[in-house]
Amino acid sequence: MTSVPTPIPSRTQVVLEEIKHRILTGRLSPGQALVESELAAGFGVSKTPVREALKTLAGTGLVVVSEYRGVTVRTVDAQMAREVYDVRLLLEPEAVRRTVRAGAPLDAARDALARSDAATDTAERSLANRDFHRALYTPCGNPLLARTLDELRDQAALVAVAAWAAEASWEREAREHRRILSLAAAGDADGAAAALHDHVAGFVARAYPPGAPAAPPKDTGTPPARAAPDTAGPTASRAARPRKSPGKGGSP
């Protein structure tokens, strides 16, 4: 019997995932310039898939496109973090409440929590964390509500990674994830929603407390740092991931 070959992802998707991974592991720093020609040379592709990947990343909020500065990795500040988390606080607890009331399966959330525990770097932990939250709000019964929360996922991940760089608090957040899941599994819709609200609100309050600068320093006119070419390409660069961080778990 002839086996069906596994579909090969498009070059744009490969480049997209690799740039996202580098942003979420800190290999591409906030404010760093992303130059199409340099990235294309590093990945061994033409500029077209790089350009398309950067457009997608701009749409999800991970990079910023400026007429004068070009494309740069988005800088996380208190204002940006509070805006993203404010919308989550308005929508996500209600979505989780509806999911629990509907009696939706929670297997995907359990799986994501296990992957977060086993993560070896911040990008893997962040991706597992996003899958955990998504598994709880997607079955809410309102596709528009779920899509709106989906649009915030990458920005929320960027906020979390920036906060982890200052304080590795993922073990605390992992315990909160387990409590949310436990309440959801018990059918306590209001309890799960309240625990989710406290989890998200507590994280942003700890990471960006009142009095924290609302925005980064103003641009002094100095050109942003440029992304150094990576001649290893997308696949080989996986071996250059940062060393395993202490502790395990997830974040909001």
Image: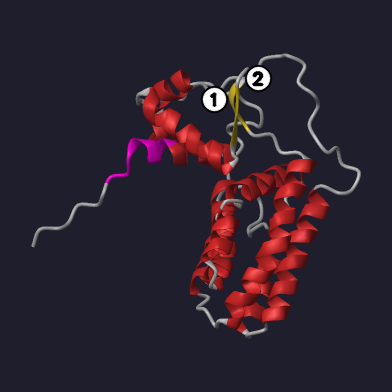
Please provide percent x and percent y for residue 180. Answer: 67, 73
The circle on residue 11 is none
Please provide percent x and percent y for residue 233. Answer: 40, 30
Residue type for callout 2: Pro
Residue bearing the label numbered 2: 224
Relative to 205, 41 lies left or right:
left
Q: Residues within 10 Å of mark 2 (few under 14, many from 20)?
A: some
SS for tag 1? Answer: loop
Give the residue furthest to the right. 211
Whether 201 is drawn above or below 186: the answer is above
Residue 66 magenta-highlighted: no
Please provide percent x and percent y for residue 9. Answer: 32, 44
Residue toward you, 19 or 149: 149
Instruction: Tell me what residue is drawn at x 54 percent, y 58 percent.
Output: 147
Majority SS type along the magenta span: helix
- Location of the N terminus by quadrant is bottom left
Residue bearing the label numbered 1: 34
Relative to 75, 40 lies left or right:
left
Residue 241 in sight in this render: no
SS for tag 2? Answer: loop
Instruction: Tell me what residue is drawn at x 64 percent, y 44 percent.
Output: 158
Indicate which disc, 1 or 2, sits on the residue closer to the N terminus: 1
Please provide percent x and percent y for residue 159. Answer: 69, 46
Relative to 6, 88 lies left or right:
right
Residue 147 in sight in this render: yes
Residue 9 magenta-highlighted: yes
Instruction: Tell me what residue is drawn at x 57 percent, y 37 percent.
Output: 23
Residue toward you, 93 or 179: 93
Q: Residues within 10 Å of mark 1 (few under 14, many from 20)?
A: many
Relative to 190, 70 lies left or right:
left
As measured in the structure, the alpha-carbon distance from the residue carrying label 1 to the one carrying label 2 is 9 Å
The range drawn in magenta is 8-15
